[in-house]
Amino acid sequence: MVDEEVVGRQGRKIATLSPLSSLSLSSPSSPNAQCQTTLRPARPYEGTIITDIKGLTEAEVSTLKALGAVEVKSGCSIPVNFR
């Protein structure tokens, strides 16, 4: 899979779309079209805490993590965004 680039009228890269559904926006006026921000759609389990979850296989835990779930070590905190 290859990233696709969007090029503006002046021939400078203004965006890159990756096969993993992220969109990186660049400033065409900056040197080397540096990445300004990356947009990614929310994953279905984004921010779901699965620390000490029981009854799942390693493959299932890995899948949940790929879909946005997180494991938190004791004493740590993570920011949670509610929509």
Image (cartoon, rainbow, N blue to C red):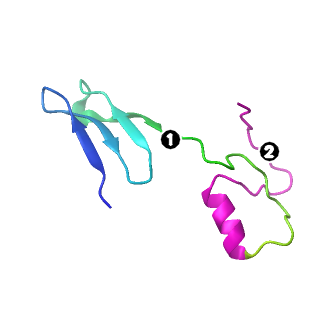
12 relative to 47, above or below: above
Are discs 1 and 2 less than 8 Å apart at CB?
Answer: no
**Residue 78 in the image, given as x and y percentages of width and height:** 75, 43
Question: As drawn, which residue projects farthest toward the top?
Answer: 29
**Residue 24 in the image, given as x and y percentages of width and height:** 38, 39
Decide: few, some or many residues near mark 1? Use Cα within 10 Å; few <14, some 14-19, many ≥20: few
Q: Nearer the viewer, residue 58 or 76?
A: 58
Quadrant of the frame with the C terminus: top right
27 relative to 71, above or below: above
Position of residue 56 in the picture relative to residue 35 (left or right) = right
Question: As drawn, which residue projects farthest toward the left?
Answer: 10
Q: Tell me, for residue 40, which label it has, or none.
A: 1
Mark nearest the camera among 1 and 2 is 1
Q: CA distance from mark 1 to mark 2?
A: 23 Å
Label 2 amino acid? Ser
Q: Tell me, for residue 67, which label it has, or none.
A: none
- What kind of element bears circle 1? loop
Identify which residue is drawn at 32% across, 61% down. Answer: 1
- Among the two numbered marks 1 and 2 on one chain, the one whose residue lies closer to the N terminus: 1
**Residue 52 in the image, given as x and y percentages of width and height:** 86, 64
**Residue 70 in the image, given as x and y percentages of width and height:** 72, 54
Does residue 23 belong to the magenta stretch? no
Which range is magenta? 58-83
Based on the displayed image, in which of its 4 quarters is residue 9 positioned? top left
Decide: few, some or many residues near mark 2? Use Cα within 10 Å; few <14, some 14-19, many ≥20: few
Identify which residue is drawn at 86% across, 51% down. Answer: 75
48 relative to 82, above or below: below
Identify which residue is drawn at 75% across, 58% down. Answer: 71
Label 1 amino acid? Arg
Position of residue 42 in the picture relative to residue 3 (left or right) = right
- Residue at mark 2: 77
Identify which residue is drawn at 25% across, 43% down. Answer: 5
